[in-house]
């Protein structure tokens, strides 16, 4: 059992924390990151939904450790997670004239050696925040902001959990990648049923299957699995609730590069194959942006803006990709990239990335004939509640056509 106990609110100083990056609210209104001033680090809130983006510094009484976690909330405040020995303290930061206000939320104590506590991605409603406490044998899910009486332990799951992907806009269905018995599979926690656990990704008995991204509107899932190539991770896609198998297109393989999806275009209800997906591509000579759609054939390679907060960004419903960046000249900027539908694919940057990959007309990784677009007619056409809160996730291996999934 993960031994983590609640402690009352305190204002203890920071003493280091897990590595953190930039985070953006689910609606794209706010972002938060640690900014640097010489050798010192301080939290910074970005406002992204106005006519011009701008940053608000939120320095505390002393500099933060470089790995301190910060996360924006839907009301513009910033949650900060500070680690003091074995105590994880949480505060809400907000501007107060020339200074920074701090609202202490309490702390979680994890005395068991080896336990790590990290924030999950921002919840869809913007009012709550969650964290995972990963112990030697189990993982506990904590509500650390938005509760009635400070941090609250919601449930405990056998095994080591990581990741964290929200499957609906209500913040009810949370997918986690669970390592148990030497294999990693994605499971779903139903937070309205006390953390009821159900499987989601079970592509093959001996494969490691992880969920990387999900779009609540269309049900599009981006996954990573070594099922098609044992011992080697590949990117694939599927549809939540669909009876069709997961596909692993050649177009998502970029030689000598790591490809990581970071944003899916929202608003494409019942049209998962039409969603644009933004990819972070890391090669021998740097990082750049890729854009891909399940219905398309290739990855379009785009240069990243100078100072890109690498791996962060969001799509608008109209298909504009917004990439936050910061340079010496521009403290807070957002580059907007509009990717026309049906435009000719761009060549990869001359960084040794090599060929982009095969067109969608090729057979999928299972050797089957070209996969058709997902049969969305078999999914409930509830346009007012398209998220999975209205339908239970179907484990992809257990779907009626699960035998076609790459083994």
Image (cartoon, grey):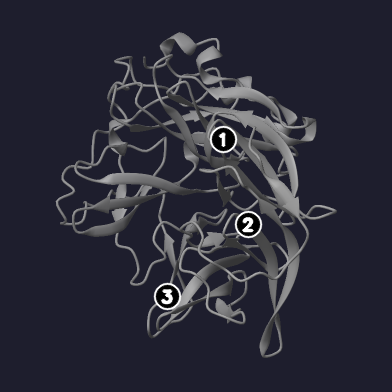
Choose top left, top right, bottom left or bottom right for residue 193. top right
Q: Residue at x 35, y 68 (%)?
A: 305
Q: Does label 1 or label 3 sit earlier along the sequence?
A: 1
Question: How much space separates mark 3 and mark 2, taking CA atoms?
Answer: 29 Å
Q: Is residue 134 visible?
A: yes
Depth order, front residue of 132/137: 137
Q: Is residue 214 visible?
A: no
Q: Which mark is residue 176?
A: 1
| Front of the two marks 1 and 3 | 1
- Quadrant (top left, top right, bottom left, bottom right) of the C terminus: top left
Q: Position of residue 25 (x, y in %)?
A: 62, 58
Depth order, front residue of 289/129: 129
List the residue tagged with mark 2: 88
| Front of the two marks 3 and 2 | 2
Question: Which residue is most to the bottom?
Answer: 98
| Front of the two marks 1 and 2 | 2
Q: Is residue 10 left or right of residue 175?
A: right
List the residue tagged with mark 3: 326
């Amino acid at each position: 059992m993960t031994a983590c106990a609640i402690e009352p609110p305190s204002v203890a100083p920071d003493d280091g924390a897990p590595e953190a990056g930039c985070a953006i609210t689910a609606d794209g209104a706010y972002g938060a990151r640690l900014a640097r001033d010489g050798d010192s680090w301080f939290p910074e809130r970005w406002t992204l939904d106005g006519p011009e983006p701008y940053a608000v510094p939120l320095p505390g009484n002393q500099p933060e450790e470089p790995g301190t976690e910060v996360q924006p909330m839907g009301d513009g405040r910033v949650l900060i997670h500070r680690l003091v020995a074995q105590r994880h303290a949480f505060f809400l930061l907000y501007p107060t004239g020339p200074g920074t206000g701090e609202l202490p939320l309490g702390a979680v104590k994890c005395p068991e050696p080896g336990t790590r506590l990290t924030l999950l991605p921002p919840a869809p409603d913007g009012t709550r925040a969650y964290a995972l406490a990963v112990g030697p044998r189990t993982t506990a899910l904590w509500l650390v902001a938005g509760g009635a009486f400070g941090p609250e332990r919601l449930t405990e799951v056998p095994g080591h959990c990581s990741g964290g992907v929200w499957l609906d806009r209500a913040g009810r269905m949370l997918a986690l990648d669970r390592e148990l018995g030497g294999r990693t599979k994605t499971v779903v926690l139903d937070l309205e049923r006390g953390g009821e656990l159900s499987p989601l990704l079970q592509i093959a008995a001996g494969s490691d299957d992880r969920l990387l991204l999900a779009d609540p509107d269309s049900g599009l899932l981006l996954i990573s699995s070594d099922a098609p190539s044992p011992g080697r991770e590949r990117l694939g896609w599927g549809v939540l609730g669909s009876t069709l198998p997961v596909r692993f297109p050649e177009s998502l393989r970029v030689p000598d590069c790591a490809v990581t999806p970071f944003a899916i275009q929202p608003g494409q209800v019942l049209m998962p194959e039409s969603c644009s997906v933004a990819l972070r591509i890391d090669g021998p000579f740097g990082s750049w942006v890729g854009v891909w759609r399940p219905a398309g054939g290739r990855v379009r390679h785009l240069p990243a803006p100078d100072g890109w907060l690498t791996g962060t960004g969001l799509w608008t419903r109209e298909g504009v990709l917004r990439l936050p960046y910061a340079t010496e000249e521009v403290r807070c900027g957002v580059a907007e990239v509009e990717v026309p539908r049906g435009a000719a694919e761009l060549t990869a940057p001359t960084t040794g990335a090599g060929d982009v990959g095969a067109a969608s007309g090729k057979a999928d990784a299972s050797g089957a004939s070209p996969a058709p677009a997902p049969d969305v007619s078999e999914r409930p056409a509830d346009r007012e509640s398209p998220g999975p809160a209205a339908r239970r996730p179907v484990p992809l291996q257990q779907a009626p056509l699960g035998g076609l999934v790459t083994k």
